[in-house]
Image (cartoon, rainbow, N blue to C red):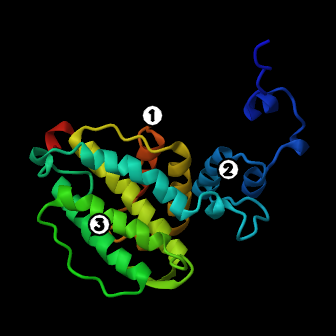
Amino acid sequence: MGRPPEAPPASMVEDRGVPAVDRPQTVSQLIQTGRDHEAAQRGVREAASGRQSPTPAPDQGLERLMDPLTQLGQLGPVLGGVVAGITPDQLDRKTPCADYTVRGVLEHMIKGATAFAATFRGEAAGAPDVSDPLGGFHPALGDLGRAMAAPGALERTVATPFGDLPGETFARFVVLDGLVHGWDMATATGQPYEPSEALVAAVEAFARQNLDPLRDGQAFADAVEPAPDASPIERLTAYTGRRPLTEAAR
């Protein structure tokens, strides 16, 4: 009669006095026990504080928590929803991305997607048509996704704006770029923006490990202090140097 009671969440079990020695303590152990969300959160905390979990092997730590194609699969619908909600009269609104309007962000992303797709294929990039940024966005991003998912694409070394990088590492930069630009456009057009906390945590951990040497005041500005009540995505965008728009600036 009825369903048996569900097991309590892991956090509740821990609160009931499970000895600390029995609890997974490292990012690697959390991943191995299926507690990905906790692992992502712990990874972000440790990256922010300069601490690292002891003994995570290169293929077991937070970077393997969510592979870049899974990240892209989670980002795509959220980013696509924002672009679908942009109206032509909003294209010239300012965004939190310095010197970029909504149109500018779309054009930048179309050009980037075209160039990055060619990079993952080992080809020379052509010049994309950005005359219709709303109409051209989805085809460009779809082609980039196919290029990233092609067999061997993430295993090869690719030439990037940051120098030669493993394809998987550059794919994580692509997701970081798309995730933050989605917030730029959503903020400028007054839309909700709700990527999953697990996605944001994994991307933020990667950003904190890799971003500082790349801060040039343009692609990535100096980090700013997020508001005390900032959401996870707002904390990430603050780390990339974004400042919230005031109503007067829109």
Residue 67, given in percent of the width and then of the height, sits at: 58, 62
Tell me the residue at 28%/43% (across/down): 187
Q: First in sequence: mark 3 or mark 2? A: 2
**In which image quadrant can residue 38 be found?**
top right
Label whose residue precedes the other's in the sequence (3 or 1): 3
Badge 3 density bin: few <14, some 14–19, many ≥20, Cα 10 Å: many
Numbered disc 2: secondary structure: helix
Q: Along the horizontal axis of the image, is 118 left or right of 236?
A: left
Real-space Cα separation, disc 1 to disc 2, in angstroms: 22 Å
Residue 140 shows which numbered tag? Answer: 3
Badge 1 marks a residue whose secondary structure is: loop
Three-letter residue code for mark 1: Asp
Tell me: residue 9, above or below residue 157: above
Going by the image, does 104 lie left or right of 61? left
Q: Which residue type does callout 2 highlight?
A: Ala
Compared to residue 1, the image places residue 191 above or below, namely below
Label 1 packing within 10 angstroms: few (<14), some (14-19), many (20+):
few
Residue found 31% across the figure and 77% down from its top: 115
Q: Which mark is residue 128?
A: none
Element assignment for label 3: helix
Expressed as whole percent of the image width and height from the top left, the position of residue 85 reads 24, 42
Work out whether 1 lies above or below 229.
Answer: above
Residue that extends furthest to the front in the rendered view of this protein? 1
Provide the residue designation for mark 2: 39
Q: In the picture shown, does residue 11 fall above or below 36? A: above
The label nearer to you, 1 versus 2, is 2
Residue corresponding to mark 1: 229
Picture coordinates of residue 1, whole percent (x, y): 80, 12
* Distance in Å between CA atoms under marks 3 and 2: 33 Å
Query: Mark 1 touching mark 2, by CB under 8 A?
Result: no
Residue 26 image offset from top left, x and y in percent: 76, 54
